[in-house]
Image: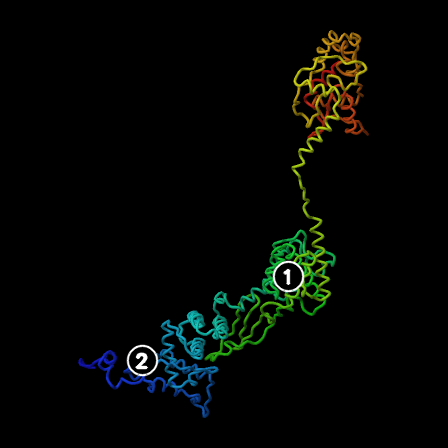
Amino acid sequence: MGQDSVDIRELIARLNANERLRQSSHFSTGVYRDEPIVRTGRQMANYLPDRYREMRRISRWQERSGEARGRWLSEAELFYRQARFMEDFEDDCPYHGRFASYYPTYNDMSDRQLRGYFTWRAAVRRGEVRETSLSFACIYLYELLNGIGWKDPADGFAKIREFWRAYRAFDTGIDRNARVWLHDFAIYHALDPELLADDPVRKLDLELIGIARAFEPYDPPLRSWLSAANSNAAEEPEPAGTPGAQTRRRNNAPALPLPPDVASEQRMFDAIAAHAGYRVDHSRLYAEHPDDFRHVLCTVFVRMLTYYRKNRSHGLVESSFGEEAEMGYTMFGSAVFFEEHPHADADYELDPIHRYRCRGGLWTCQRIYGGQGRSKSWGEIARAVDGRLRQALGFEPTLTDAACPKYLAKIIDREIDAWLTWKRDHAPRVIDIDLSKLSGIRTAAAETREALLVDEEREDEGAGDQPEPLRTERADEPRAQTVLAGAAPRAACGTAREAHRPSPSEAVQTEQVAPAFSGEKEDVGRQLDLEGPLGSSGTGHEQFGAAVAPAVSLAEDELAYLRALLCGEMPVVPAGASEDLLVDGINEKLFDLLGDTAIEFGAEGPCLIDDYRDDVRELMQP
């Protein structure tokens, strides 16, 4: 093109911008859409570029070189060859009409529609996804499935997913096929299964694995139902309190351990709540009595696991969600897809219970085939538990329409009764203290104490802190009135006394002054009659011994026991005798002398109270 040549696009832009031309009589009538007044040849509707003519020349009849007869191409193969030919082509002629067809291909389009599609595809590849006919969107996905328009499988997966998510804003009808095709694309090209983390099929598989792991400790046959998923769980020890096998559980044994294992029950409850037709987690009873509802519901389901194994051909879980099977599988079903070369033999594991296999170009799928979503039978069981537990607890409102078979009602009632009985037997004791009655209790205690006091004790309380005059004991007075009779009892062996009690020698000196004031000289000559070391006439106690301590008579084994305690040795108990009785006898004989227990049993055995060691040692001196 010479220097004087003008760019045709620039010339058209100038003409369209010329206001004088716009106001010309040639354009003064009629209604015009928002489109250029002057078009290039490619933009004209009746113009068809040569590339389209060449594409249409690709015939379904293919001659075979060296052979007399050719063959007809399938619709999928013809689409694949034409798509390869038009892979990089772009057009600039928008189409505003509608195009609809089952299994649409290029051959189903008119020239105008064909040009409109490649114009729309050019915008999509630039990132501008616009609303158009759903058939156009399907053809674009067909191209991606057949390897048209991407550099590697990961790029192809990303393009399919991005286009699907963008176009569903215009038409959610694309979800039905695009989701399956994206799933198959990852398997066909052996991509990372984590790319399908949002795939509903994989989510259902993971939910089934969760159900199996929650109920498998109580229904061991589930290990074969989900053998791969539970291969590791089979090696783990069984949870505490769970039976090793269904056959070993007695009918009268608790279905679940008591007290409840809250963590284990919560896993089962969550599985039931996620898959039961009745929304147990929305129940008003569960909101106000969560522990009661959760435990009874889980125990009933455990019982139903046993019941189904015994009385039905399949277990409760298998009956609700299907059984594992291997069946033939068609990749990219409902799509126009062609394999130029058969797929190599391959094995692909989407998850532990969902696997694919390709042998000789034929695919099979091994998975759990059955119902999907929420289980109606599980919902009926859960609703029956809710209704009968409300009646047992007197909870309002009741579920009047929660009818169930007799065998199920019997199981539910038995588990409710067992739970409520256990709960009642192990309920914490409630102690209600009425503080307003404490003053009355103090008053009653004071009156009782006053009634038990003797006259002398009342006189002592009246005297207050004034010292009591010294006096001697009369012969007719009880021994409890002696100087040593008021010693306070000890609480533990070896602890210090709160008040000092005079030793026998101090008591004797005190009593020497008493006859001068009392005038009772007949008591001066009374002597302490002790046998053995304690029973000899002794010295220093003949004149006032009767006033200090009454007569004490100890046996030889009792004296030996006391000597051992004084020396810090382990006392020896005579054969056939009881140490408790021996100690009680010694304490009883010394009580009148000391006014308190002399020997007590501590953490290390019998011991002599420290406050009385000097008293006992002095009395045992010859």
**Of residues 571 and 275, the one drawn nearer to the viewer in this rendering:** 275
- For the N terminus, the image quarter is bottom left
Q: Is residue 254 left or right of residue 37?
A: right
**Of residues 147 and 360, the one drawn nearer to the viewer in this rendering:** 147
Residue count near mark 2 (Cα–Cα under 10 Å), binned few <14, some 14–19, many ≥20: few
- Amino acid type shown at disc 1: Glu
- For the C terminus, the image quarter is top right
- Residue lying furthest left in this view? 4
Residue 429: name its quadrant.
top right
Is 259 situated above or below 186?
above
Tell me the CA gap for discs 1 and 2.
68 Å
Q: What numbered label is drawn on residue 35?
A: 2
Q: Residue 549's spot in the image, x, y percent?
A: 76, 16
Question: Can residue 261 be spotted in the picture?
Answer: yes
**Of residues 63 and 558, the one drawn nearer to the viewer in this rendering:** 558
Q: Residue 580's spot in the image, x, y percent?
A: 77, 29
First of labels 1, 2 by sequence position: 2
The mark lying in front, picked from 1 and 2, is: 2
Residue where numbered disc 1 is placed: 216
Is 538 situated above or below 292?
above
Is 329 situated above or below 587?
below
- Amino acid type shown at disc 2: Glu
Q: Residue 350's spot in the image, x, y percent?
A: 53, 68
Q: Are marks 1 and 2 in contact (CB under 8 Å)?
A: no
Q: Is residue 321 left or right of residue 176?
A: right
